[in-house]
Image: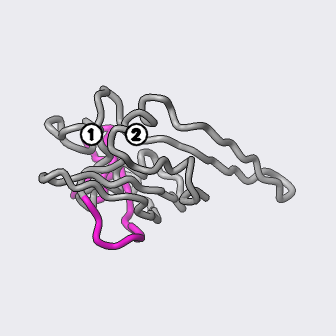
């Protein structure tokens, strides 16, 4: 879940990510960055929630490259930080749920192995995130046809 709502239902973020010279933080826009590498993230909007303020959106996100904090950095770079992200979002950012954690969950990871095999790892949505979605009346991405 991210801060803000989306007009388009799908999108791609293609911005290089590097380490900020004086920090361990990653960025797409810092002027003095080290180890700048190309990065691509595709996303699909499952649900928008308008609350009279900036609102929130529930996304499926598909990182096509594997950069450190890629999802968090890319979403923040387009003005939609992950809900509850105090590093790449705002320390003042309101959270849509009663928790100190980010609303970020890796449902599915697929890792290519030797000889063309693929290891597939799946994890259910944690209870606190399920509860938050239920409180909003949002569909769970793992309980609907929205997931992969």
State which quadrant residue 102 falls in.
Answer: top left
Q: Which secondary structure lies at badge 2? A: helix
Q: Judge whether residue 26 is colored magenta.
A: yes
Which mark is on residue 134? 2
Identity of the residue drawn at 21% across and 53% down = 55
State which quadrant residue 148 falls in.
Answer: bottom right
Identity of the residue drawn at 39% across and 49% down = 138
Q: Position of residue 136 (x, y in %)?
A: 33, 44
Q: Nearer the viewer, residue 126 or 108?
A: 126
Q: Nearer the viewer, residue 96 or 23?
A: 96
Q: Position of residue 12 (x, y in %)?
A: 42, 70
State which quadrant residue 54 falls in.
Answer: bottom left
Relative to 93, is 75 above or below? below
Magenta range: 5-33
Q: Mark 2 Cα within 10 Å, few/some/many (few <14, many 20+)? A: few
Q: Nearer the viewer, residue 30 or 58?
A: 58
Identity of the residue drawn at 37% across and 65% down = 15
Which mark is on residue 96? 1
Disc nearest the viewer among 2 and 1:
2
Sequence-wise, the earlier of marks 2 and 1 is: 1
Which mark is on residue 114? none
Q: Report whether 26 appears left or right of 65.
A: left
Q: Which secondary structure lies at badge 1? A: loop
Q: Judge whether residue 66 is colored magenta.
A: no
Q: Report whether 147 appears left or right of 7.
A: right
| Dots 2, 1 in contact, CB < 8 A | no
Q: Report whether 48 appears left or right of 54.
A: right
* Residue 38 makes an appearance in the image: no
Q: Position of residue 90 (x, y in %)?
A: 18, 41
Q: Mark 1 Cα within 10 Å, few/some/many (few <14, many 20+)? A: some
């Amino acid at each position: 879940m991210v801060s803000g709502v989306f007009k388009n239902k799908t999108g791609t973020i293609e911005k290089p990510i590097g380490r900020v010279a004086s920090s361990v933080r990653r960025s797409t826009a810092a002027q003095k960055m080290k180890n700048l590498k190309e990065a691509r993230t595709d996303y699909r909007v499952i649900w928008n929630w308008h609350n009279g303020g900036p609102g929130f959106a529930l996304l499926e996100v598909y990182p096509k490259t594997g950069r450190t904090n890629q999802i968090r950095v890319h979403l923040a770079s387009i003005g939609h930080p992950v809900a509850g992200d105090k590093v790449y979002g705002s320390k003042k950012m309101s959270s849509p749920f009663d928790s100190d954690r980010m609303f970020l969950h890796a449902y599915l990871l697929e890792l290519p192995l030797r000889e063309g095999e693929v290891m597939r790892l799946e994890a259910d949505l944690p209870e606190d995130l399920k509860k938050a979605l239920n409180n909003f009346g949002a569909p769970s991405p793992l309980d609907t046809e929205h997931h992969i």
